[in-house]
Image (spheres, rainbow, N blue to C red):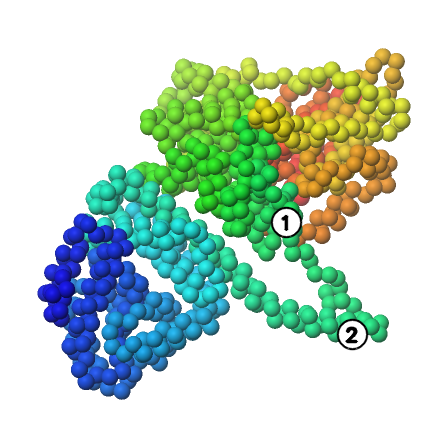
Amino acid sequence: MHDETQDPGPSGYAAARLRLLTEEARSGPPRRAALADLTDDWLTGLFTAGAEGARGVSLIAVGGYGRAELSPRSDLDLLLLHDGSDAQAVTALADRLWYPVWDLGLALDHSVRTPAETRRTAGEDLKVQLGLLDARHIAGDLGLTTSLRTTVLADWRNQAPKRLPALRELCEERAARQGELQYLLEPDLKEARGGLRDATALRAVAASWLADAPREGLADARRRLLDVRDALHLTTGRATDRLALQEQDQVAAELGVLDADALLRQVYEAARVIAYASDVTWREVGRVLRSRAVRPRLRKLARERGDFLRRAVVGEGRAPGGGKPGAERSPLAEGVVEQDGEVVLARAARPERDPVLPLRAAAAAAQAGLPLSLHAVRRMAATARPLPTPWPAEAREQLVTLLGSGRPTVQVWEALEAEGLVTGLLPDWERVRCRPQRNAVHLWTVDRHLIETAVRASEFTRRVHRPDLLLVAALLHDIGKGWPGDHSVAGEVIARDVAARIGFDQHDVTVIATVVRHHLLLVETATRRDLEDPATVRAVAEAVGSQGALELLHALTEADALATGPAAWSSWRASLVTDLVKRVSAVLSGDDPAGPQQAAPTAEQERLAIEAVATGAPVLALRAQTEPPAEPAGDPEPLGVELLIAAPDQPGVLPAVAGVLAMHRLTVRTAELRALDLPDGVEGSVLLLDWRVAAEYGSLPQATRLRADLVRALDGTLDIAGRLAERDAAYPRRRGVVAPPPRVTVAPAASRHATVIEVRAQDAPGLLFRIGRALEDAAVRVRSAHASTLGANAVDAFYVTGSHGTPLPDEEAVSVARKLEETLRG
């Protein structure tokens, strides 16, 4: 090779180039570097032969060639730099360089400029400036090249506050045109989001010294994409970056990869690394630039404060802004805070002692609509304890909250997945991660489709009685696609195992498994079968088994279709599925549950009730609840705190209790309220509240303090509404999740003794207080209540009567429900 390249003519270089590209022993980075070295030698020979008499000239490689990353059909990006002293000689030299390149049929991107012209062009054209950041000397005046590199880098760093936002805009525009590499069946390896252009942009950000690409594996991801592009060039013989379907098998064979699906999965994994690194890096750039913009204002504020302090000595003035600066860290959940627009771990957080922390942090981030800090995710990935099997109740609830958070779930899930936390929580996820779907209807890989389905399902949580089961079924419905055979059959087995592992009881496990097994049943039956045939409807009813499962399946069917792509759902399909669901529901109508059966009071409940009657005031007891330990020798897992309250039956008990708990930052997980029948000989009427609560962060308040505040709330001396409003106003407003609107309905024929009003809404501090107060304002009596928090969703049922203790007339019941819904929406 060396002997043939001594001749500056094209023939020796062409032969050596061909041999290099057909060597099986050399591929990947070594071949790209060798091709760059070979090309350097050839161009150096051409330069030396043509530069006689020329002074102050250098030949510089820029862009990909400057990085010594020549793919078989890459352009040669060259700059002929000169000092302007002999323009005629430079023109002649350029002809002797460019024409041999063209004669070989190589693509050439060339320019001839002085340093001043180069600097001016770079200042006007961002793409030129980016190429120059990788400038590499080939031949000629080394001092000229070195001076240019120094100048270009200095300009880039000085102009970074203006140039980086422009670069980010270019990346976003390109992503909008080309799509996301990690999901495309025929991706552009260079231009799509997460491709080689984005990897180059990250290098440019690092060169600015403002931020750096943060993720390990970035170099390997970039190398993988370059390897695939090399193979694509060799198999097609063209300078293309688009990995077309008909070429994927050949490219896979060239790389020694099993098949086209395995090839795409490797491409998707690399693109995901680059895309995630880009997200984190651009977020850091934005934070740095905002910080720089704020500094002048801070200096001005500091001067104003100095003036104020000097005036204060003689009794003048007030503090600028009228108060102290806001807190830098705002609590979100136990061990989790917001700082500078990101979710980070609290200083007291101990991931090594708190296995639920990753899910709690993720749920808090998604609910707040904020990204998870890279440092927080890495720390949790490195130190967090694995969850026991089955999961504790809090872990299950936090997963449901995360899945029900809507669009922000995607960003948070990607952060967890990037550091391996998802497969740590759900080992079965590994088989669907980055798995392509060779179906033009599908927009996403299997794993992203599952998350998209959960996002869509979060919009339907008001339509179902068990939103937690809906969201988990959405996450798992295609989990069987990682296994051979019918993915619904395989998915049922996996879903049953996963649901049990994360702590659902046997009944709920069966429902989730049934919904996953039959997640295609409704749409396939509705569009392919005769719905007038009773046998068709009976077959669906037998497969589904219950009204609850049917309700979940209906919502999942729509969520699944909407998450697949625009071609998968239509008003026609929706009407057919709805018609089928109505017919199946009629068959299953005999399974409607009766009203709730009240259990006999326990000895402790009776004792509290008698004490409440005797004192004429509320009494309460707190008792920690635990789950059995995951291991025989382990400690019990904390489940929450049971709060038992007995109070004389009077108006306002429900909103008073709910308001006091909200004031003390206690989250209500479940709540039961009922009128208690007292033992014979004891006069009076008592309401018993049996609630499970947990502290948002910090420790529980003392029972004596809770009781004192409850007494004040009932006698009207504690303004709960005002206190809650003041607290809300003291915290900064966050973007957060755009939740589906509340839905309040009257359950038909649910009870012969009371009207049942059902509320489904986004859980929030003070929600039960607002509901209770609205029902009191409507002049109805709450005879019993059954409230539960399923992730971020509150699903509550209130048994109410009129003043005479009878169910409300239909029109009045509808009016109460409508006004309650308006109150919650307002």
Residue 131's quadrant in the figure?
A: bottom left
Which residue in the protein does label 2 denote? Answer: 310
Q: Nearer the viewer, residue 464 or 184?
A: 184
- Tell me how far mark 2 sits from mark 1, CA to CA: 36 Å
Q: Is residue 159 above or below residue 590?
A: below
Q: Is residue 118 left or right of residue 410?
A: left
Q: Is residue 734 left or right of residue 250?
A: right
Find the residue positioned furthest to the bottom: 85
User: Looking at the image, which residue is at 32% across and 78% down?
Assistant: 143
Q: Nearer the viewer, residue 822 or 720?
A: 720
Q: Is residue 583 left or right of residue 811?
A: left
The N terminus, quarter of image: bottom left
Residue 347: which numbered mark, if any?
A: 1
Residue 670's quadrant in the figure?
A: top right
> Where is residue 528 shown, x and y percent of the image?
35, 25
Pick whichever of labels 2 and 1 is earlier in the sequence.
Answer: 2
Q: Is residue 538 above or below residue 820?
A: above
User: Looking at the image, which residue is at 16% across and 52% down?
Assistant: 23
- Mark 1 element type: loop
As shown in the figure, which amino acid type bears the numbered disc 2?
A: Arg
Find the residue positioned furthest to the right: 615
Q: Are marks 2 and 1 in contact (CB under 8 Å)?
A: no
Q: Is residue 340 above or below residue 316?
A: above
User: Looking at the image, which residue is at 58% across and 42% down?
Assistant: 351
Q: Is residue 489 above or below residue 263?
A: above
Q: Is residue 518 at all visible to an observer of this figure?
A: no
Q: Give the number of callouts.
A: 2
User: Looking at the image, which residue is at 78% across and 28% down?
Assistant: 621
The C terminus, quarter of image: top right
As shown in the figure, which amino acid type bears the numbered disc 1?
A: Arg
Q: Nearer the viewer, residue 743 or 256?
A: 256
- Mark 2 element type: helix
